[in-house]
Image: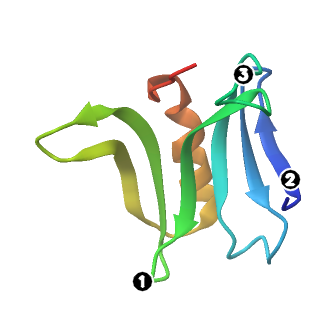
Amino acid sequence: MAQQLILIDDGVFYIERNVNGDAAVTNGFLLRRCKVGVTTPGGYECIGGYERAPSGMWRASINVPYDAITDSDSYELGDTFGTNRDAIAALWKSRHEAHCQH
């Protein structure tokens, strides 16, 4: 399992980034703590993330209820963030809007 690094944590939600790469270019995840269960063996669920887009800009997205019209269960917060910090900030600000299943 890849090691992670917690960037922000409020006790319920937290953002982790992969340490298997340079912090300036690696991705990360918005996670929400929940009960340990069959589908959440680690006691958390992933409800969003950020990553570097092929364009070199950063994007962030959160989970939303599935929409058959768009055939999607994620909402892109943006894909033109100039830095990963901007994408992380947008992700963190939207943590309460993310769809949680557990």
- Residue occupied by mark 2: 5
Q: Secondary structure at mark 3?
A: loop
Relative to 97, 24 lies left or right: right
Task: Identify the element where label 1 is drawn.
Answer: loop
Q: Nearer the viewer, residue 70 or 8?
A: 70
Mark positioned earlier in the residue sequence (2 or 3): 2
Q: Quadrant of the C terminus?
A: top right
At x 36% / y 50%, what residue is drawn? 76
User: Is 47 drawn above or below residue 16 in the view shown?
Assistant: above
Residue 73, placed above or below residue 27: above
Left or right placement of residue 86 versus residue 22 in this view: left
What amino acid type should be assigned to the residue bearing mark 3? Gly
Q: Residue at x 77, y 21 (%)?
A: 36
Residue 57 % position (x, y): 47, 75
Q: CA distance from mark 3 to mark 1?
A: 38 Å
Q: Nearer the viewer, mark 2 or mark 1?
A: 2
Residue tagged 3: 37
Residue 99: which quarter of the image? top left
Dot 3 surroundings within 10 Å: few (below 14), some, or many (20 or more)? few
Q: Residue furthest left?
A: 69
Residue denoted by label 1: 55
Q: Three-letter amino acid code at disc 1?
A: Ser
Q: Amino acid at mark 2?
A: Leu
Residue 93, labelled with which disc? none
Q: Position of residue 72 (x, y in %)?
A: 27, 46
Q: Which residue is depicted at the point 44% across and 25% down?
A: 97
